[in-house]
Image (cartoon, rainbow, N blue to C red):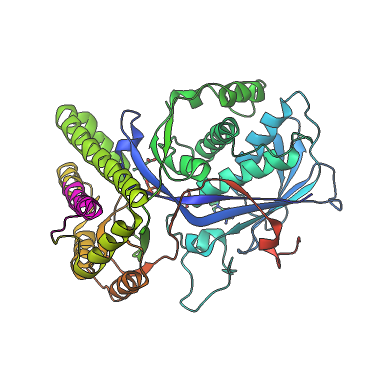
Amino acid sequence: MSVAISAPGKVLIAGGYLVLDKDYSGLVFGLSARIHCISTPDPSAPKPGTITVRSPQFLNAVWVYEADKKTAVKQVLEEGSSENKFVETTLRYVLSYMGTLPDANPHPSTIITILADNDYYSQPLSPVPRFNNLAVTLSESHKTGLGSSAALVTALTTCLLTSFSPPPASAPDMRTIEKQQLIHNLAQASHCAAQGKVGSGFDVAAAVFGSCVYRRFSPSILEEIPDPSYGAFARRLKEVVEGPWDLQVSKTRVPKGIRVVMGDVDCGSSTPGMVKTLLKWRSENAEDAKLVWDGLEAMNKGLIDMLEELRLCAEEDAAIHEEALEIVRKQGWKEGGSSKSLQILQKIGRQISKIRKIIRAMGETAGVPIEPEAQTKLLDAVEGQINGVLGGVVPGAGGYDAVAFLLVDHEETLGELNTVLAGWEGGAGGKVKMLETREEQEGVRREVLEGYEGWGFV
Ligand SMILES: Nc1ncnc2c1ncn2[C@@H]1O[C@H](COP(=O)(O)OP(=O)(O)O)[C@@H](O)[C@H]1O
Ligand SMILES: C[C@@](O)(CCOP(=O)(O)OP(=O)(O)O)CC(=O)O
């Protein structure tokens, strides 16, 4: 039977850098842009246990693996075939883990198709069909920074667990928190191994749990997993992924009538080394840094609380909330107003400005362009010109390549934002493209197969 699973991308609205430390939080929204993995049995495979993974939107993107006694999978490298570290590592980790389960069976030959929603990669200007075929290799594609590897690893992990679990227990019911945790732990372990570094893991957390306030796990948890070539790999992996993890996830959602919009700045200059430089500054200036980190954490938490307050307000009195959104849309959030919703909207607008101020100061002191001047100009221009925008930030690690906005979810406001972004030509930043994706609450999920018609397996 075929199985389809999807997992969302992410945008870290608040808590960049802080979230690397388990004493601080990040506010991350899952996105409607998803990566999908569809598995289908492959009775005509040349050998039993063959797993063929293909990503048909890209050139040269078919990876064939066979069962291997030592490391669970071995890639069959055919003439001209490429490697895919994230796919291979995920297969190795998940199949090794599944091999330790009491009712483990050899897995049947299977084809897994990866389909990525268009917003993950820069697209041509003309309208494109769903899962557009980019006709370039993966390494030639231009990523928009939505966290493709985390969404892929999460969807693939879940797809393998679901496809290869013996019936009737097949399909770990992803809605149970235990299963979500197992998926998370396995995906986090493979993702870190494939990446070759341990980040905060907020991207994998968002892919699994969806929009949330995230506090990271202790990095030492992953140090317990040996190299896959080591005999005890599968046993140790099982202990780690089934063991306790100390991450904290509290699910969240944006208030009704508000949405997140992302802008992709086509300047090609993400700034590698920003994390390293900032952390070096932090370790050399521990006292000053603590003040900044604590100050920013308090401000970020304030924003999280305000969003929650607004969400409740919207539920309590939908009509008054709607009215407040209309006032903001027409007059901006700076004007006075008396309803509770309006006051919270104003507080949110002010809070975002304050957060940006701290981030700019933090970047300047540490010599890292977290919110570079070009982005300051862009964010200020958008806030100044469009009433319905509560505020904009540089998401994640910041830098030149992306912006994200919180705004009133109204066609006119979106249209105005699109116009301002499309016409923007500022500073070091190049053209800015508004992405279609928006925040979404739900994490990894099972999909119905009908949505993938035309891709050769329904
Ligand atoms: N659509 C896809 N098909 C196959 N592999 C993919 C796809 N999208 C991402 N990947 C994998 O993820 C890698 C990109 O990961 P990375 O550079 O960390 O980007 P990101 O920040 O988007 O996660 C690719 O090299 C590839 O291994
Ligand atoms: C600095 C960070 O806290 C946030 C980086 O967020 P981005 O969204 O910029 O991440 P990438 O997808 O890796 O580009 C590092 C981390 O938390 O791992």
Above or below for 292 versus 322: above
Q: Is residue 155 magenta?
A: no
For the point 43% across and 59% down, the residue is: 438
Q: Where does the C terminus fall, quadrant-wise?
A: bottom right
Q: Quadrant of residue 99?
A: top right
Q: Quadrant of residue 439?
A: bottom left
Near-viewer residue (129 or 439): 439
For the point 68% across and 53% down, the residue is: 38
**Outermost residue to the bottom:** 126
Near-viewer residue (165 or 17): 165
For the point 67% across and 29% down, the residue is: 97
Query: Residue 373's spot in the image, x, y percent?
Result: 18, 59
Asked whether residue 291 appears in the rendered view, the answer is yes
Above or below for 80 versus 272: below
Horizontal relation, residue 151 to residue 53: left or right: left
Q: Which residues are magenta?
A: 336-357
Q: Is residue 341 magenta?
A: yes
Asked whether residue 273 appears in the rendered view, the answer is no
